[in-house]
Amino acid sequence: MQGIIAAVPTPVDGDGTPQHAAFVEHCLYALAQGCDGLNILGSTGEANSFDTATRKDIMRWAAEALDPERLMVGTGTPSLAETCALTCHAGELGYAVALVLPPYYYAPVTDDGLFEWYAAVHRALGRRKIRIYLYNYPQMTGMTLSQDLIERLHRAFPDRFTGIKDSSGDLDYCRALAKALPEFRVFPSSETSIGEAADAGFAGCISATVNYSASLCAQLWATRDAPDAARLERVAKIRALIASQPLIPSIKHLMAQRTGDPVWDHVLPPFMALSAKQAAALAPLEPVRAVEMAG
């Protein structure tokens, strides 16, 4: 996979039950707006607030409605057995990529321990062709996946461990990985990185805010060899404004505005829906989006 990947949210009703029609509609919308692929059930999709059976249902919805070669799905949990089951399920559904968090409860852990954990996921997959992208998110997991570990996994299992999503915000980390492993697909989590994607060797970006700005980001990606400074600035302003409020509730609120469907304003505990004041802070996005779509 490469290019603009939206980390899609998961619509739920007031009881926390995922909503099939709204979910599929949004996935189709994001692809129509120019996304090259979708990240299902990542952090933005509130994956770790769902049980295994529900996650499998959502995975099936996406695989049945969309081209699974354009899909990656979050399957990492602290439980090795659960991670293997979810990743195998994704492989059976035809997903191109599983995005796998490290086991994030116990600490400290060694690179040797993490290598054995990820190697066990690989072995569980058998002949399933699904690729694994590592998911580096130290703010949530309490650990940073080291370059040594990443290189070791890729060299031991080159057809399985083929990329990474980095949500640390550390572009030096991404640059170092892309330089050390040119064939390894490195995805920063911010679309503001597109401006240096060609020079740094990034494979694209995987971002929550792309749900709102997909069209503009797709234009940037298409011209990444000579990025437009004004367009980059607009992307940065959109992202900064959305991120000024709680991110996942903000993305869902913007989807409620887009569709007119209030189901999108529901979030799973421990998140809270945006307050009126928080929602009002996002109001400047409407004219920004009108400009985006016009240009």
Image (tube, grey):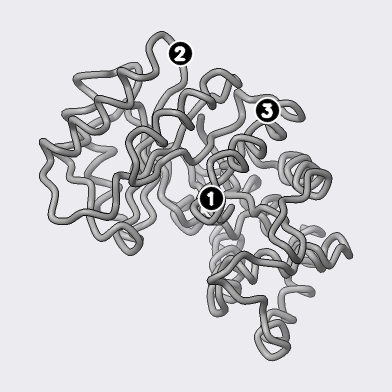
Q: Secondary structure at mark 2?
A: loop
The percent position of residue 81, horizontal first and vertical second, equals 36, 32
**What residue is drawn where x is 53% and y is 25%?**
89
Point out the image quarter for the C terminus: bottom right
C-alpha separation, residue under disc 2 versus residue under disc 1: 23 Å
Residue 15 sits above or below residue 188 on the image? below
Tell me which label, 3 or 2, sits earlier in the chain: 3
Q: Which residue is mark 1?
A: 47
Question: In terms of image quadrants, where is residue 84?
Answer: top left
Instruction: Name the one closer to the observer, 240 or 151.
Output: 151
Q: Residues within 10 Å of mark 2 (few under 14, many from 20)?
A: some
Is 253 placed above or below 220 here? below
The kind of secondary structure element at disc 3 is: helix
Q: Residues within 10 Å of mark 1 (few under 14, many from 20)?
A: many
**Residue that numbered label 2 is attached to:** 128
Q: Residue at x 65, y 65 (%)?
A: 251
Nearer to us in this view, 149 or 91? 91
CA–CA distance in space, label 3 to label 2: 16 Å
Mark 3 = which residue? 63
Q: Which amino acid type corresponds to the residue marked 1 in the rendered image?
A: Ala
Closer to the camera in the image, 129 or 166 = 129
Left or right? Give the position of 35 relative to 174. right
Furthest toward the right, the residue is 260
Question: In the rendered structure, which amino acid carries the disc numbered 2?
Answer: Arg
Asked whether residue 119 is in view, the answer is yes
Residue placed furthest toward the top: 127
Q: Which callout, 3 or 1, points at the residue further toward the start of the chain?
A: 1
Where, by quadrant of the figure, is residue 184 drawn? Answer: top left
* Amino acid type at image mark 3: Ala
